[in-house]
Image (cartoon, helix red, strand yellow):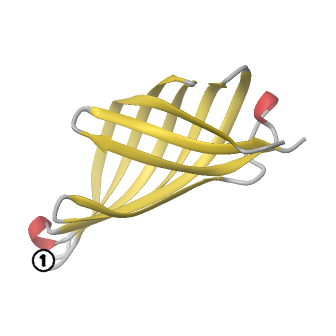
Amino acid sequence: MSIIHTTANFKITSWDQTPYDEPEKGSQFFQAKVKKIFEGNIEAESTATLLMCQSEGNSGAGYVATERVVGRIGNRSGSFVIQHGGAMAHGSATDSFGYVVPGSGTDELQGIRGHCSFYHEGEEATLSLDYEIVE
């Protein structure tokens, strides 16, 4: 099977953030439980746990996340897990990564593998996913 490229817009429906390390000087560390709804070529809901670092003076930030997506991609239904992360410097994204965790697919998405990225521009938020299903 060849790689399929798909995208979906998403909205964050819940964000519950708590600090987990608050040194007097230096970066601050937070954990967030996040829920999203995806619309478009991916119709799904997700739950993610993010670990975030905010630099002193807000000049930079970074995060890593594990996110379980449940729903439909094209005509296939099931769930899968993605891990992703990124960094920002002075308000601009500098580095990002994301991938489907091997072996995490269920039901009709069993065997899914691939790479993903997230884009935010103003109020718009998009997931881009390049994937294949190995049967």
Residue nearer the viewer, 20 or 74: 74
Which of 49/72 is in front? Answer: 72
Pointer 1: residues within 10 angstroms few (<14), some, or many (20+)? few
Q: Which residue is mark 1?
A: 24
Residue drawn at (40%, 43%) of the image? 33
| Residue 86 drawn above or below residue 71 | below
For the question of whether residue 63 can be seen, the reply is no
Residue 2 screen position, x and y as percent: 78, 44
Q: Quadrant of the C terminus?
A: top right
With 116 as the anchor, is 90 left or right in this view?
left
Name which residue lies at 67% across and 53% down.
101
Q: Residue furthest left?
A: 57
Residue 44 in the figure: left or right of residue 13: right
The residue depicted at 35 percent of the width and 36 percent of the height is: 125
Residue 130: % across, % down: 63, 45
Number of numbered callouts drawn: 1
Q: Residue at x 72, y 20 (%)?
A: 75
Q: Residue type at mark 1: give it.
A: Glu
> At numbered mark 1, what does the secondary structure look like: helix, strand or loop?
loop
